[in-house]
Image: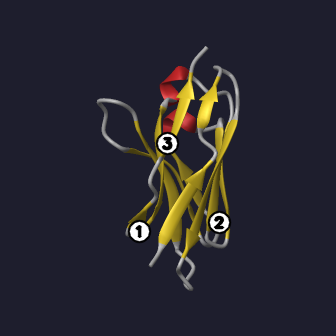
Amino acid sequence: QVQLVESGGGLVQPGGSLRLSCAASGSIYRFNVMGWYRQAPGKQRELVARITSAGSTNYADSVKGRFTISRDKNTVYLQMSSLKPDDTAVYYCNAEPYWGQGTQVTVSS
């Protein structure tokens, strides 16, 4: 059974940084695309960033230049810098058709 296990969320002040990690276990295959989504209260889940097995990436406009996605086989990372209160959300790891349980990121002073 495939599981995506996230870690690294927490509370950070505006302008700070956090690094999220997501490890996929239970699969012998390399996922072609892995990504991060987020959902803020009262809003729909949205794509933050994704990366292919070849290393191609794409980002939401709102995080370009601040967030960096990377991966090592079936582990994906999201380095978040210059965080803003608008980045507050539950962040979910995705490797279709699987989802992680979510990790809370709160940006507040």
Query: Which amino acid, by three-letter code, is at mark 2?
Result: Gly
Depth-wise, is mark 1 or mark 3 nearer the camera?
A: 1
- Which residue is the extreme one toward the top? 109
Image location of residue 32, percent across then percent down:
52, 74
Sequence-first disc among 1 and 2: 2
Sequence-first disc among 3 and 2: 2
Please give the name of the residue rendered at 61% of the width and 28% of the height, measured from the top-left corner: 11
Q: Secondary structure at mark 2?
A: loop
Q: Local crowd at mark 1 within 10 Å, few (<14), some, or many (≥20)?
A: few
Please give the name of the residue rendered at 65% of the width and 20% of the height, measured from the top-left corner: 13
Query: Which amino acid, by three-letter code, is at mark 1?
Result: Glu
In front: 101, or 53? Answer: 101
In front: 7, or 81? Answer: 7
Q: Secondary structure at mark 1?
A: loop
Alpha carbon of mark 1 to alpha carbon of mark 3: how far? 19 Å
Residue occupied by mark 3? 60
Q: Are marks 3 and 2 in contact (CB under 8 Å)?
A: no
Image location of residue 52, percent across then percent down:
57, 67
Residue occupied by mark 2? 55
Alpha carbon of mark 1 to alpha carbon of mark 2: how far? 17 Å
Q: Local crowd at mark 2 within 10 Å, few (<14), some, or many (≥20)?
A: some
Please give the name of the residue rendered at 56% of the width and 85% of the height, measured from the top-left corner: 28
Residue occupied by mark 1? 96
